[in-house]
């Protein structure tokens, strides 16, 4: 059992080349803050990128930042904040939910897991902000893709291919992200006491208005008490975040009040409470309980989310809340069984989407597909892509899908390797 | 055609043309197969008209099943296929091949679903970009990416090219506004990526498909996000004595935390050509003209106009007009939107380039372009998506003068090399196609290109879909698949543990 800790891209390349030659699988790690997500790995060696660290380029006026893949996200967010900027896609921190520390994680992990947050509706995810990468494929080849400019259609977008690949196609060594100005002001409008279906309707109305709502979440009764240190109280809260320049925020909040005045009691939340409400929703704080009860992250069409959940509640004990106008559903399975088939069947029945088992005991993660199983043709296409980039299956083997094994290796490959 | 090498036509396919045409008529009955040379003439080129080629046969399917059967038929018989939307590509992405079926998707022209609660439109790929906005504007919604060809270009083509437009700094490119597609692989398999929900369950194949220039699959359905129209929009028209000042003004606007809906710059030749053509009232005594458009609630727009105006003065603007009416805002844009035809009036032909650069390099690149202009003896006018660094130099030439097209192409290639040298890229929104294919090594080494081709190999291992585009050199997938590792040479005990 060896842990490699390269400090340069060249050392990373040498390590992967060695592993490819030895056909010796590697677990690819940054800080390990998301290590509990995916099928458990059984690799002999670990490639730890936390020493491959440092911001290499930051030009605020050009809205661009490059960093080595192992650079702490916290360091980047601090640097951006000092310049009034941010990663607008608001990457979530899985640490507390998975029983780990707060504030860990690397910028490479942000892309590999395609992180995002409540602003996903308007600002997108990591995939929407990545401009360029350098990486080492499972073949032990160092390559680059993209660049440092926003508008670029030169060749295939391999940077996006790295998003949500969980270290299974290539080891990132450098990433370049688009950065954006942080909003000057943030105010949250809370509608209190709505049931899920009314909340969904209110959020659809708000997002369909020109008030430029940047985030919309619904915390059902009792869940509401588990954010921002309980400052919302336990009544159901339907939350609409409005960001921008002061006069504009005031105007848009007023417009939303006009629009939704009949829906129920309204409250304005601003300052530190608003910030911590959205941070806790982002990080799934209501379920960061130190327990091992399975937690799902489900993405669906916003208007169908609550219908699926209603049907699920008929058959299983779940605790749940919504982000993304109702399209992102966080679920905690209260009886300890993930109920994967039941949940995924209902997601399909209510218009489709995907369910990821983001927290579960290793035994569950070994037995239940953590990532949504794909239709056969799509699964085959993904497997072909994996085989192209990592023919020896040495990068996080089996983390996303059961390993295809040596069947993907043609006779030509065997010959060349001997 | 100036020295463009396309894949050698396959003799066996050429000999079987009659049989292939007959089989296509069985798969796509009715008027969907065109094989007469005079009728195929309409399809011989796309927006890059310097290159023309008649295809083997033109096929216009109407159903997904037909697309699947055509592709499977061709895959089984090693016949090449070139997909085409509306044919507005400016890089030759839809240029036919002599031995290839031209698969035209224009009959896929229906909107399938409008879903306002989820703010989604499901459209067939042949629906025009503007057609989506038209379908939802009565409810105050629109589809944000707005390439200047939006009246004609198809949404399927937008996916293939990852099209942008003047609003993409604030609202994103096609890749940021498409939630899902249905596509057919070269082997005939139908695959769905994404849907009405956000993000992929596995690899981001939707992200890879977007901008893949028709080499990976044929799009048969597109699911896009629509947005509510901003309440209002106003524009500033700002003139500067130097391009440096204009460039600094752009940097300062962004530095102040303002992301305008649109931010366009023109240089002196472009300003003069546009003013002569549409009389927009542009100042003629400036070197750089900036149009900054702010959109959103009226109170926000008014607030930001004040900030931008102050930034402009600080940077030495000599003229700054603020639109006081919708009519005046449109008049500011009239010259910019007519810039291409305006340049067409002052030169028999023009060649439109599409590099992107880091914004701060604008003065250096404009300076380099002036030197190149003298070297090649050809004029150049510049329009610039200033917000995102996307430069459109228009090279003026006369195709009737022998050698001048070649000269213009060499000039263009040098401009793109300059863009890459300062940290930019070969193409911001027009695509590589055939036009910039042979310049790819300026930006990528062979290993970089091999990784891109490996994606191709996973989708279309026999290189049958749109070959001769994007990649300067086609390498067989079997050859690419070999792994050249030498066990023992990097033995475990020797490896440094860093």
Image (tube, coloured by chain):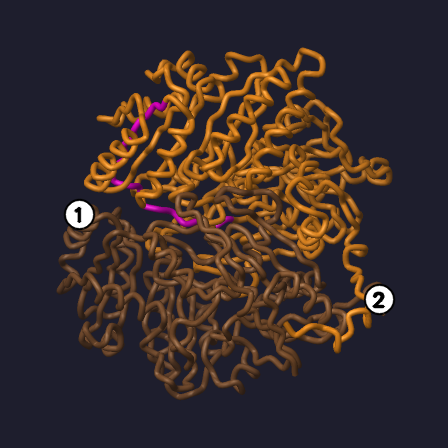
Figure quadrant of residue A187: bottom left
The main secondary structure of the magenta stretch is strand
Q: CA distance from mark 1 to mark 2?
A: 67 Å
* Mark 1, secondary structure of its residue: helix
Residue B134 location (% of width, % of height): 38, 37
Check residue A9 in the rendering and tell me which mark sits there, or answer none: none
Chain A tint in image: brown
Residue A232 location (% of width, % of height): 19, 72
Residue A343 versus residue B468: which sits nearer the camera?
B468
Residue A27 visible within the image: yes
Residue found at x 38% / y 63%: A117
On what subunit does the disc labeled 2 rest? A
Residue behind mark 2: A411
Figure quadrant of residue B427: top right
Is disc 1 surrounded by few (<14), some (14 to 19) or many (20+) residues within 10 Å? some
Figure quadrant of residue A241: bottom left
Q: Is residue A313 above or below residue A259?
A: below
Specify the segment rendered in magenta.
B222-240
Residue B220 versus residue A18: which sits nearer the camera?
A18
Mark earlier in primary sequence (1, 2)? 1
Residue B290 location (% of width, % of height): 37, 28
Residue found at x 26% / y 46%: A210
Residue A42 within the segment the image draws in magenta: no
Residue A49 location (% of width, % of height): 56, 69
Q: Is residue B370 above or below residue A380?
A: above
* In-image side of A215 versus B203 (left or right): left
* Mark 2, secondary structure of its residue: helix
Residue found at x 55% / y 69%: A51
Residue B186 visible within the image: no
Colour-to-chain, orange: B
Q: Quadrant of the C terminus of chain B?
A: bottom right
Residue behind mark 1: A251
């Amino acid at each position: 059992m060896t842990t490699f800790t390269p400090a340069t891209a060249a050392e990373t390349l040498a390590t992967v080349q060695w592993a490819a030659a030895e056909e010796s699988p590697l677990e690819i790690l940054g800080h390990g803050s998301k290590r509990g997500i995916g099928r458990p790995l059984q690799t002999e060696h670990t490639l730890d990128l936390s020493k491959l660290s440092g911001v290499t380029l930051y030009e605020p006026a050009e809205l661009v930042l490059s960093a080595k893949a192992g650079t702490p996200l916290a360091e980047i967010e601090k640097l951006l904040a000092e310049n009034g900027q941010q990663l607008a896609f608001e990457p979530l921190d899985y640490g507390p939910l998975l029983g780990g520390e707060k504030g860990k994680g690397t910028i490479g992990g942000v892309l590999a897991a395609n992180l995002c947050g409540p602003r996903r509706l308007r600002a997108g995810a990591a995939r929407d902000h990545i401009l360029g990468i350098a990486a080492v494929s499972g073949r032990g080849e160092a390559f680059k893709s993209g660049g440092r400019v926003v508008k670029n259609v030169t060749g295939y977008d391999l940077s996006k291919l790295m998003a949500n690949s969980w270290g299974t196609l290539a080891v990132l060594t450098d990433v370049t992200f688009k950065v954006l100005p942080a909003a000057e002001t943030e105010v949250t409008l809370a509608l209190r006491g709505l049931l899920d279906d009314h909340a969904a309707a209110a959020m659809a109305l708000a997002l369909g208005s020109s008030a430029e709502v940047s985030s919309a979440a619904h915390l059902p009764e009792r869940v509401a008490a588990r954010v921002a240190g309980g400052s919302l109280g336990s009544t159901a809260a339907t939350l609409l975040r409005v960001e921008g320049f002061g006069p504009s925020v005031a105007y848009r909040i007023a417009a939303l009040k006009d629009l939704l005045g009949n829906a129920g009691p309204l409250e304005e939340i601003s300052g530190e409470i608003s910030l911590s409400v959205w941070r806790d929703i982002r990080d799934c704080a209501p379920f960061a309980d130190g327990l091992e009860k399975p937690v799902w992250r489900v993405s669906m069409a916003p208007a169908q989310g609550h219908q699926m959940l209603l049907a699920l509640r008929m058959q299983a004990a779940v605790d749940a809340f919504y982000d993304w106008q109702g399209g992102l559903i966080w679920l905690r399975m209260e009886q300890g069984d993930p109920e994967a088939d039941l949940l995924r069947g209902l997601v399909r029945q209510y218009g489709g989407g995907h369910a990821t088992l983001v927290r579960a005991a290793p035994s569950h993660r070994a037995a239940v597909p953590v990532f949504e199983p794909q239709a056969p043709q799509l699964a085959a296409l993904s497997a072909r892509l994996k085989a192209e980039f990592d023919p020896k299956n040495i990068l996080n083997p089996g983390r996303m899908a059961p390993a295809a094994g040596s069947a993907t290796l043609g006779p030509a490959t065997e010959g060349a390797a001997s | 055609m100036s020295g463009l090498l396309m894949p050698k036509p396959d003799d066996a396919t050429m000999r079987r043309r009659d049989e292939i045409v007959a089989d296509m008529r069985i798969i796509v009955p009715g008027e969907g197969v065109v094989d007469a040379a005079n009728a195929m003439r309409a399809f011989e080129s796309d927006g890059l008209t310097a290159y023309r080629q008649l295809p083997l046969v033109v096929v216009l399917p109407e159903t997904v099943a037909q697309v699947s059967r055509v592709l499977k038929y061709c895959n089984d018989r090693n016949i090449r296929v070139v997909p085409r939307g509306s044919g507005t590509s400016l890089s030759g992405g839809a240029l036919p091949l002599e031995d290839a079926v031209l698969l035209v998707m224009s009959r896929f022209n229906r909107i399938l679903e409008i879903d306002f609660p989820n703010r989604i439109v499901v459209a067939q790929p042949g629906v025009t970009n503007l057609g989506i906005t038209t379908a939802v504007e009565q409810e105050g919604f629109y589809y944000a990416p707005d390439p200047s060809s939006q009246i004609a270009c198809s949404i399927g083509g937008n996916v293939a090219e990852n099209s942008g437009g003047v609003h993409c700094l604030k609202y994103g490119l096609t890749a940021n506004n498409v939630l899902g597609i249905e596509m057919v692989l070269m082997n005939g398999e139908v695959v769905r990526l994404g849907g009405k929900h956000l993000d992929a369950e596995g690899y981001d194949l939707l992200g890879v498909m977007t901008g893949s220039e028709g080499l990976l699959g044929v799009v048969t359905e597109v699911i896009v996000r629509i947005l509510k129209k901003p309440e209002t929009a106003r524009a500033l028209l700002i003139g500067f004595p130097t391009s440096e000042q204009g460039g600094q003004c752009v940097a300062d606007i962004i530095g102040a935390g303002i992301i305008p809906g649109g931010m366009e710059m023109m240089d002196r030749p472009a300003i003069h050509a546009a003013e002569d053509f549409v009389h927009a009232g542009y100042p003629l005594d400036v070197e750089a003209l900036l149009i900054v458009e702010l959109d959103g609630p009226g109170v926000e727009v008014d607030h930001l106009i004040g900030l931008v105006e102050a930034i402009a003065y600080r940077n030495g603007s000599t003229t700054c007009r603020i639109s006081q009416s919708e009519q005046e805002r449109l008049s500011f844009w009239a010259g910019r939107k007519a810039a291409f035809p305006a340049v067409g009036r002052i030169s028999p032909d023009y060649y439109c380039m599409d590099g992107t650069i880091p914004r701060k390099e604008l003065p250096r690149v404009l300076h380099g372009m002036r030197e190149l202009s003298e070297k090649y003896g050809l004029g150049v006018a510049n329009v610039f998506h200033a917000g995102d660094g996307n430069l459109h130099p228009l090279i003026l030439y006369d195709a009737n003068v022998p050698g001048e097209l070649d000269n213009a192409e060499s000039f263009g290639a040098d401009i793109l090399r300059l863009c890459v040298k300062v940290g930019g890229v070969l193409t911001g929104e027009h695509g590589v196609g055939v036009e910039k294919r042979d310049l790819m090594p300026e930006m990528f080494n062979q290993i970089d290109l091999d990784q891109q081709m490996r994606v191709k190999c996973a989708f279309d291992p026999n290189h049958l879909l749109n070959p001769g585009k994007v990649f300067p050199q086609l390498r067989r997938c079997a050859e690419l698949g070999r792994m050249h590792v030498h066990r023992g040479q990097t033995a475990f005990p020797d490896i440094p543990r860093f």
